[in-house]
Image: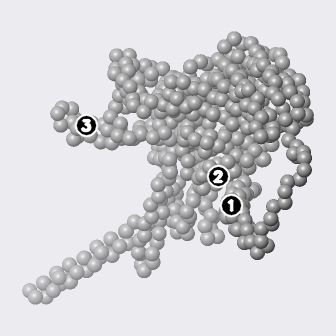
Amino acid sequence: MQNGKRALNLFSILHFAFCILHFAVSLPAFAQTALTVDTRSLRMNDLLTITVDLDGPFASLKVVYVPLQNLEIVGEPGSSSEFVWNNGQVSRRRTMRWRARPLAPGAARVGPLVLNAEGQRETLPGIEIEVLPELVSTSNDAETILRELSETGRQPMFVVSEVEKTSVYAGEPVVVTWWLYNAASIQQWQIVSVPKLDDFWTEERPKAEQPERVYVGDVMVQRLPIRKVTLFPLRSGSLRIGGMAVEAALMRYIRRGPFSTYNGELIEASFTSAPINLTVKPIPPGPPVDAVGDLSLTCESPVQRKNGPVVVRVSLSGVGNVRAANPPRFERPVEGTLQVEGGEVLVSREETSFGMSRQWRYLIFPATSAPMEIPPLSMRVFDPATGQRKALRCDGSFVNAVVAAAPAGSAPAAQPAPPRKVWPFVAGALMLLLGVAIVPRLRRELALRRAVREIVDGATPAEIRARVEQRVHIDLNEQSDRGDAWRALRSLLDAAERERDIAIDADAEIVRRVREVLRYR
């Protein structure tokens, strides 16, 4: 009997040990390096999740670039790492995830992905994706979009692009507004992609902060302007204004009734507004124009102070792209030496109105001390409202000009010279003040030049954009001089990347605009 119990106990121990050994052997090993997606087919307003599993030496990679075709990354990638001890060895695995949105219906592709780490190289094959078209991605009619979303069982959250007119002249301002419509319970939302306006100069406009309630068909919804810009077409032809993409977290309630608030789940939703096609007409043949828009020219009376130059202040204002305007010209030569300074641009950023002005200062150094005529100033502009050219003009005027000269007469009485012992202290104080004023500025200038050189030297437009984004964290919609400089740089880099013909020296202009972005930092 005792022998039977011992045998049974021994059998139990062996069985238990065998189970443990089987469990240890069957422990799942780390998955090998792989590239995967959550779906092979998606609609235009769906999001694709891209996952890269890195194992072994590739887990130490900090930056991984996934090539994409007809897809665009949304937001920042997510990353996680895990470690496992197995047979006395520690293994590491790293997982990176991206969210991407489709750009157009049709075929898309993720990868292939080439990895290099510690002398090892591995190529992960690409994955083909099918992007399905849908009606809402081609319409900016709110009622059509809401009806389509309702019929397909999706959340009633969408974006509509609205333009005040679809046919303009080159250089004529046109206002575009992107509206967020919502009949769902939005917990949070964000703009994940803005259109690249390569063929336009843009001026950001203020927008309302509070949503308004409107009827779309027979449904009450909220709408909020999420971006409003004034565009100035840089060329004629059929120009395209791309869509704006928004991602939101929506609450979907599972039950109805008084306790439905406590029975819901958060779901992610994405929507991209339909593009807008703008017909831009060339300016009719005729004499060249200095500016385009509904503009006016004002000139102040000439002023001369303390035998200095005669100063004439001139301002061009109205609704038009005055940044590209040429300064007015004198109709006749002036009696003296002329210099033109300034050209500063002021933008009136109000919700209900928009206007721009540009100011110049004309400095005239008289040749003689006598009454001097200031000739009329004029410039030629094109008015889109009438489709005609018109001349803006300031009438001439007169000023009693005085040439600066040394005073005549006897020399002034000699003043006692200061003691010689004071001069070293005065010179030292001046040198100290000069150093305090100039040295920091010189250091900042040298640091700025070094930063610009590190960003631009030997870099492609895409690399320049990435390097600037690493140094300067800025919202593309920021309404400031820095925001204007960043949008101008982005437009130029996009044009250079697409190898479009650029009338200016692209390399020098890129350096200048990178410098402006860093200077406003």
Q: Residue at x 38, y 41 (%)?
A: 188
Q: Residue at x 62, y 64 (%)?
A: 116
Instruction: Kindly identify which residue carries mark 3.
Output: 254
Instruction: Kindly identify which residue carries mark 1.
Output: 437
Q: Which callout, 3 or 1, points to the residue nearer the camera?
A: 1
- Amino acid type, mark 2: Leu
Q: Which callout, 2 or 1, points to the residue nearer the camera?
A: 1
Coordinates of residue 221 in the picture (x, y in percent): 36, 24
Coordinates of residue 433 in the picture (x, y in percent): 69, 64
Position of residue 144 in the picture relative to residue 261 (left or right): right
| Dot 1: element | helix
View extreme (bottom): residue: 2
Whole-angstrom CA distance, mark 2 to mark 1, is 21 Å
Q: 40 above or below 2?
A: above
Look at the image and tell me in which quarter the N terminus lies.
bottom left
Q: Nearer the viewer, residue 288 or 57?
A: 288
Q: Residue at x 48, y 39 (%)?
A: 191
Looking at the rendered structure, the number of numbered marks drawn on it comes to: 3
Q: Residue at x 26, y 40 (%)?
A: 264
Write down the quadrant of residue 425 in the picture. bottom right
Q: 326 above or below 404?
A: above
Position of residue 201 in the picture relative to residue 381 (left or right): left
| Dot 2: element | helix
